[in-house]
Image (cartoon, helix red, strand yellow):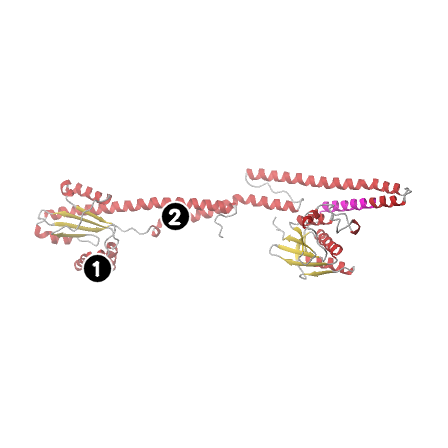
Amino acid sequence: MIRLIPNSIVGRTVLVLLVGLTLTHLIGLYIYSSDRHSTAAEANGRRVAERIAVVTRLIDRAGPERRAELARSQWGPAFKVSVTPASEAEGSPGNWRTRMVRSILENYLGKKKADKALITYKEEAPAASPQRAMAGHMMRMSENWPGMMGSSAMARMAQTWNSGQVLEVSLPLDDGRWLNFSAPFMHLKPFWASRLFFSLILMTATVFAFSVWAVRRSTAPLAMFAKAAERFGMDVDAPPLPGDGPREVRRAVSAFNRMQKRLKSFVEDRTEMIAAISHDLRTPITRLKLRAEFMEDDEQRAKMLNDLDEMEVMISEILAFSRDASAQEPSRIFDLAALLESICDDASDAGRDVTYDGPAKLCFTGRAVALGRVFGNLVENAVKYGGRAKVSLRATGDGVEVRVEDGGPGIPEEHMKTVFQPFRRLETSRSRETGGVGLGLSVARSIARAHGGEITLSNRERGGLLANVRLPVLDKTS
């Protein structure tokens, strides 16, 4: 389905401007075209009426025997005069054109004679009228001016009469005959053939181009904020935004930079606090171990030492997590395929069932050490809880995808999201004796999200768990 309303602010603003310009020009064109036709028709009608009045006065003064010949002498390419026993004009209630012609005739000929005139304005001539009714007039014109026969002037005359708008006037003469006039109204060129139309098109295109440029320039700060927010979500140490542009933009940039600074301080303070607490807990744990050695009950002493060892492992994991969070590893271009192959080869050398399927080389921009920890953790979990690991790598349209499959029992659907929580473990399938304290997946997801990616878990139809890591290609300009 075609979307008529654009998604972007630039597209919607340009659409509003374009619709507004189009409606404004259409209304203006309609008013101009109506006024143009009315003005042209009024000027043409006045010109024809004045000529009719002049010819009428000329023929009235001539003798009856000379009137027909004198009428033919007044013919022109767009003006026919004849003297006939009966009127050729039918007479009609009329419109503003006929009333205008009658008013002009009254000024020149007097009200009495003008009231007797039969005036007809034909908007559309009968089908055969231009060819038959005017054939005699055109033939007589060619007889009077032999040079017109077959010339371009003859073609122009035919085109003039074929316009379909003809004014017919019949005036009674004092000898009982009728003086008949026929004249086509001026046929204006279509508006789109005029210079003004091309001027409007050029003006609209110019205004449209300038509007697109202005709207893009005005909305550029929004794109800058979007990139900055995305960059800050992947890198808490991202540099602040430059405070350029209008006053409103500078205020927004200043507020964004202050927010970024406060969030960065909050994350650093929290990480340092956790690291300090974990470090300080080691001293009382060591004292408890020394006291446990003096316990007489061997069973209770073993249990207490085991609990203390477990607490020490948890503290070590927390300290390692804190060090990784505070580490400032820069992003660089590295061979992701080589990194995955190295992890798989190391696991295979240790006697584990790990295979790699993917390209021999695939360059990626990111933190190689941190990503190595992500994939190493996923491979270790797959081997530990699924017996084997199959690692595959492929490039997608907007980044890369790494899949780690195992052959284990999988994870219940209700625990798919909770396994990413810190210190969260599934006791039914992953006891504490088999490994760490439950920070591995949490750290892995944090690293993936810091790269703008995501880790998802799903159960395979044929058994086993699938860990899917999607990493986008980072925009270097952001």
Name the residue rendered at 79%, 42% in the picture: 279
User: Which amino acid, by three-letter code, is at mark 1?
Assistant: Met
Question: Where is mark 2, residue-wise?
Answer: 200
Residue stretch rendered in magenta on the structure: 308-328
Q: Residue 182: x and y, percent?
A: 19, 51
Depth check, front residue: 439 or 409: 409
Q: Main secondary structure of the magenta part?
A: helix
User: Which amino acid, by three-letter code, is at mark 2?
Assistant: Leu
Q: SS class of the residue under badge 2?
A: helix
The answer to whether residue 311 is visible is: yes
Q: Residue 414: x and y, percent?
A: 68, 48
Depth check, front residue: 145 or 274: 274
Q: Residue 328: x and y, percent?
A: 71, 47
Name the residue rendered at 25%, 45% in the picture: 43
Question: Where is mark 1, residue-wise?
Answer: 148
In the depicted structure, whether residue 406 falls above or below residue 418: below
